[in-house]
Image (tube, rainbow, N blue to C red):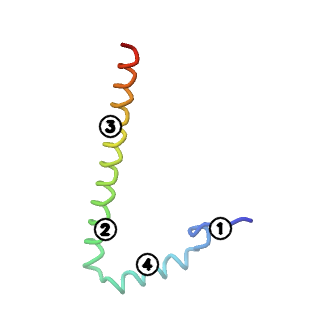
Amino acid sequence: MIQPTLLGMLGTNEIIIILVIVLLLFGGRKIPELMRGLGKGVREFNDAKSNVKREIEESATDVKNSVKE
């Protein structure tokens, strides 16, 4: 069974309607604040992701070094 994705189901008209509704609900002044908060959240997520990746790589290197000795 094929399940369509959300973006695949939305056309240009639907996206414009959603954007207009968001603009009406939050107003022009709140949208930059919301986007700024979203940007900070994405940045923090990426920082945490890279920190986890670095820690995993460091521990893998430590394990390799202890096996060689």
What label does residue 41 carry, if any? none
Q: Amino acid at mark 1?
A: Pro
**Which image quadrant for residue 35?**
bottom left
**x and y percentages locating residue 68 in the rendered image:** 39, 14
- Which residue in the protein does label 4 denote? 19
Q: Amino acid at mark 2?
A: Met
Name the quarter where the C terminus is drawn.
Answer: top left
Name the quarter where the N terminus is drawn.
Answer: bottom right
Of circles 1 and 4, the one toward us is 1
Mark 2 near mark 3, Cβ–Cβ under 8 Å? no
Q: Residue at x 38, y 25 (%)?
A: 63
**Which of marks 3 and 2 precedes in the sequence?**
2
- Which residue in the protein does label 3 denote? 55
Q: Residue furthest top?
A: 69
**Does dot 1 land on a helix, a strand or a loop?**
loop
Report crowding for label 3: few under 14, some 14 to 19, many 20 or more residues within 10 A (C-alpha). few
**x and y percentages locating residue 16 in the rendered image:** 48, 78
Gap between marks 1 and 4, in whole Å? 22 Å
**Does dot 4 land on a helix, a strand or a loop?**
helix
Mark 4 near mark 2, Cβ–Cβ under 8 Å? no
Give whichever of 18, 53 is nearer the camera. Answer: 53
Of circles 2 and 1, the one toward us is 1
Q: Residue at x 54, y 79 (%)?
A: 14
**Which of marks 1 and 2 precedes in the sequence?**
1
**x and y percentages locating residue 34 in the rendered image:** 29, 71
Report crowding for label 4: few under 14, some 14 to 19, many 20 or more residues within 10 A (C-alpha). few
What label does residue 35 carry, if any? 2
**Which image quadrant for residue 51?**
top left
**Which of marks 4 and 3 precedes in the sequence?**
4
In this picture, residue 47 sits left or right of residue 1: left
- Which residue in the protein does label 1 denote? 4
Report crowding for label 1: few under 14, some 14 to 19, many 20 or more residues within 10 A (C-alpha). few
